[in-house]
Image (tube, rainbow, N blue to C red):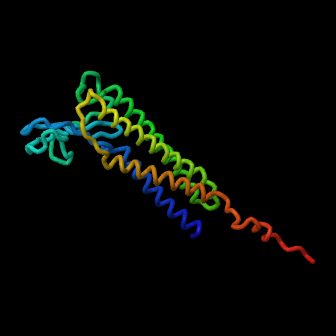
Amino acid sequence: MQKETKTKILFFVLMVGSLCMLTAVVTDHWAVLSPRVESVNSTCEAAHFGLWRLCKKHIYIEDEELIGKGCGPISLPGDINCSYFRHFTPGEDSEIFEVKTQREYNISAAAIAIFSLVFMILGTLCLLGSLRKGKDYLYKPAGMFFAFAGLCAIISVEVMRQSVKRMIESEETIWIEYYYSWSFACACTGFVLLLLSGIGLLLISMPQMPRNPWETCMDAEPEQI
């Protein structure tokens, strides 16, 4: 496969990875949390959250089989109330949300995700510059920026995973069940595509190695007899 074809494939994969990561950052379906259903003909509060806000959904329960199980699924109709993490204050929703600790987790994850976006922008600028003739050397910094973006993405994912784990294990919250949703999947997909494509660009930017140890000697001009 020619270098130009490989580069076009990597460009496409990088574009998909960047879109996945951008989608994960701006949406709030990283994780879905469910409390225990205590009674029928009443509402329970399931929740989903992302890097910036928590959304609680009031779901009306009619089926007696759901008693003792988790509230949901989140796709059921109900009233939604969303709050950004900077709006949480001590004393509000204390039975639902560990305000201080959870806010610190999400601010950290959001900040790392922003770094990922910055690296993606820098990598994209390098790629645009490499389109000019004779600018192939920009593949190397572009590859490094996209690889760093992928690493930041997986760190942000891990911080969010620890955040969810802490919420479930805490005795101060009401959640008993959780699962990771499509925004989380987008972040994981972005990590894989950005990291692998960034490494691919780095490999393409490296000088071609000889196929055989003696190839450079064979390429030399023969001596005149």
Q: Which residue lies at the image location 83% right of the left edge and 72% below the top edge? A: 221
Percent position (x, y) of residue 44? Answer: 15, 37
Q: Residue furthest top?
A: 91
Left or right: 5, with 113 as reference point = right
- Is 152 placed left or right of 87 in the picture? right
Give the x, y percent position of residue 190. 43, 51
Question: How many marks are shown on the rendered structure?
Answer: 0
Q: Farthest bottom residue? A: 225
| Image position, residue 26 (x, y; %) | 35, 44
Q: Position of residue 224 (x, y in %)?
A: 91, 76
Q: Residue at x 57, y 54 (%)?
A: 129
Q: Quadrant of residue 220?
A: bottom right
Screen quadrant of the C terminus: bottom right
Above or below 114: residue 10:
below
As drawn, 41 above or below 123:
above
Q: Looking at this view, name the residue that lies furthest to the left.
A: 41
Which of the two residues, 3 or 223, is positioned nearer the viewer here? 223
Q: Is residue 192 left or right of residue 61?
A: right
On-image quarter of the N terminus: bottom right
Question: Residue at point 69% right, 62% down?
Answer: 209
Residue at x-position 20% and y-position 48%: 75
Please tell me in which quadrant of the rendered image residue 138 appears: bottom right
